[in-house]
Amino acid sequence: MRSRRTAFRILLLLTLVWMGVIFWFSSRDAAESSSFSRGLLRGLLSIIVPHWELRSAADQKAIIRAVHTLFRKLGHFSEFTVLGLLLAMTLRLFFRPDQIRRQSHPRLTGIALPALWALLYACSDEFHQRFVAGRSCELRDVCIDLAGAFCGILCCMLILRMRKKRHLRQITKEGLPPAA
């Protein structure tokens, strides 16, 4: 029981820190945010595009301009994928397993609650951006954030299912009957 409480506290701290990271990214003005994402994109393209360094500066700028918006939206998606995963794991530890099994709708705890928290944070994040120079509040970004959170929640569920199957295989391999 003690290790479960410790794991919950660690996950809660990681979740709050990650929310702080998202807030920090959102607090950057448009010029700073764009410059940061263009720098990341330039570094990534130098790794994945063959002979990037041999291309002309104009060609490099054209490629960056073409994929910059998609790259920024993938940033939103990936930030909230991590948040969804952390929220799902944290809430999973917050509720006792017997509470979850007794619920008439156990998916409420596993999917709906983390998704609701992610949605509320995405809305507050976009609202916060209204007050940052050059940034805007867009429903499209909230939808992208929520899609990312769902991806993280589903990853959490997949990981838990794989762990459970591995545990059951181990139990049956040792000759012990699986617990009901």
Image: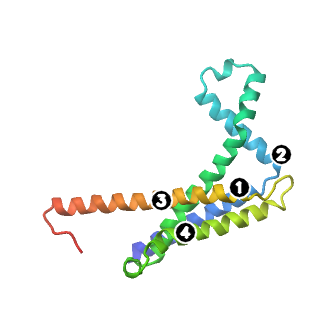
* Left or right of residue 29, residue 59 in this image: left
- Determine whether 156 is above or below 53 in the image: below
Residue beneath label 2, please?
31
What amino acid is at disc 1? Arg
Point out the image quarter for the N terminus: bottom left
- Residue at 84%, 62% (x, y): give it: 131
Coloration of the structure image: rainbow
- Residue at 55%, 61% (x, y): give it: 84
Residue beneath label 3, please?
154
Image coordinates for residue 154, horizontal then vertical, percent: 47, 59
Q: Earlier in the sequence, mark 4 or mark 1?
A: 4
Image coordinates for residue 64, horizontal then vertical, percent: 72, 33
Cα distance, mark 2 to mark 4?
Answer: 32 Å
Of tags 2 and 3, the one toward the viewer is 3
Mark 1 is surrounded, within 10 Å at the Cα level, by few (under 14), some (14 to 19) or many (20 or more) other residues, namely: few
What amino acid is at disc 2? Ala
Q: Earlier in the sequence, mark 1 or mark 2?
A: 2
- Residue at 15%, 61% (x, y): give it: 174
Dot 4 and dot 3 residues touching (CB under 8 Å): no
Dot 2 and dot 4 residues touching (CB under 8 Å): no
Q: Earlier in the sequence, mark 4 or mark 3?
A: 4
Of tags 1 and 2, the one toward the viewer is 1
- Determine whether 5 is above or below 135 in the image: below
Point out the image quarter for the C terminus: bottom left
Cα distance, mark 4 to mark 1?
Answer: 20 Å
Of tags 2 and 4, the one toward the viewer is 4
Residue beneath label 4, please?
114
